[in-house]
Image (cartoon, grey):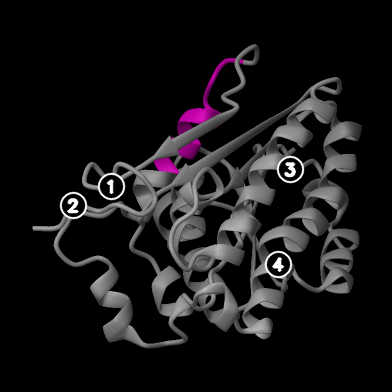
Amino acid sequence: MRNKIAWITGAGSGIGKACALILAKNGYSLILTGRRKHHLEEVQAQVATEFGTECLIKVMDVRNRDEVQKVTSELDADWRNINVLINNAGLAMGLSSFENGDLDHWDTMIDTNIKGLLYVSRLVVPLMIEAGGGHIVNVGSIAGKEIYANGNVYCATKHAVDALNRSMRLDLSKFPIKVSAVHPGAVETEFSIVRFEGDEEKAKKVYEGFENLVAMDVAEAVWFMLNRPAHVNINELTIMPTAQPMAGVIHRK
């Protein structure tokens, strides 16, 4: 019998990697999925070396329903008893006023942030029901609670995550399956590099002049939610840099 099992999407870097580290430290076996095999292998090697963690990696794009179905269907019996699902895979593309929006950027954000979460959750939830329970953590954003200039479609996708989180919480409570969301503000990961399509100089400026969150800040909040007693469900947590009181405001030095 394996330890508790956690499936983390987008596990090769950033918040997903930090969640993998904190769960491995606390005795979980891990299913790590993402698009970049070498990043997943690096996380797998790190948790094995530091914590002796059993770790299954699967290269998968959450936007591809067939790939998600294939990965899920190929899990052997020991790996199907998933206790925790962390829906971390997500991204922003571009930072344009609505009338200048790039339709390909819009499709990528909608397909990843909304449909990807749905594809994975829809296949994992029946496994949790069969096992008698579980805990889903959806990684949202302050952009899912507020809007900011030129955030339009990204904010819309994260508002959808917020709504889905609350809907899943309501629908799945009868099984019982816990559902939680963490909504971070500015976290320095690859997020801005992806948003600006590899422009590291532009991405770097996002985090200048204040102390941003780091991935482990968010992972520790996720662990707090997962580590509550059985009768306690943290519906959502919003976690912000001290210098960022709301989505569109950062006090810089």
* Left or right for 204, reference 33: left
Q: Nearer the viewer, residue 95 or 24?
A: 95
Q: Position of residue 182 (x, y in %)?
A: 52, 41
Real-space CA distance between mark 3 and mark 1, rounded to the nearest whole angstrom: 25 Å
**Up/down of 132 relative to 33, above or below:** above
Q: Do the residues bearing badges 1 and 4 touch, measured as CB atoms within 8 Å?
A: no
Tell me the kind of residue under disc 4: Ile
Q: Position of residue 50 (x, y in %)?
A: 39, 54
In this picture, which residue range is highlighted in magenta? 219-229
* Left or right for 194, reference 186: right
Real-space CA distance between mark 4 and mark 2, rounded to the nearest whole angstrom: 30 Å
Pointer 2 local density, CA inside 10 Å: few below 14, some 14–19, many at least 20: few
Q: Nearer the viewer, residue 213 or 92?
A: 92
Q: Point out which mark residue 244 bears.
A: 1
- The residue at which mark 3 appears reads as 164
* Left or right for 68, reference 35: right
- The residue at which mark 4 appears reads as 110
Query: Per the image, is 225 magenta?
Result: yes
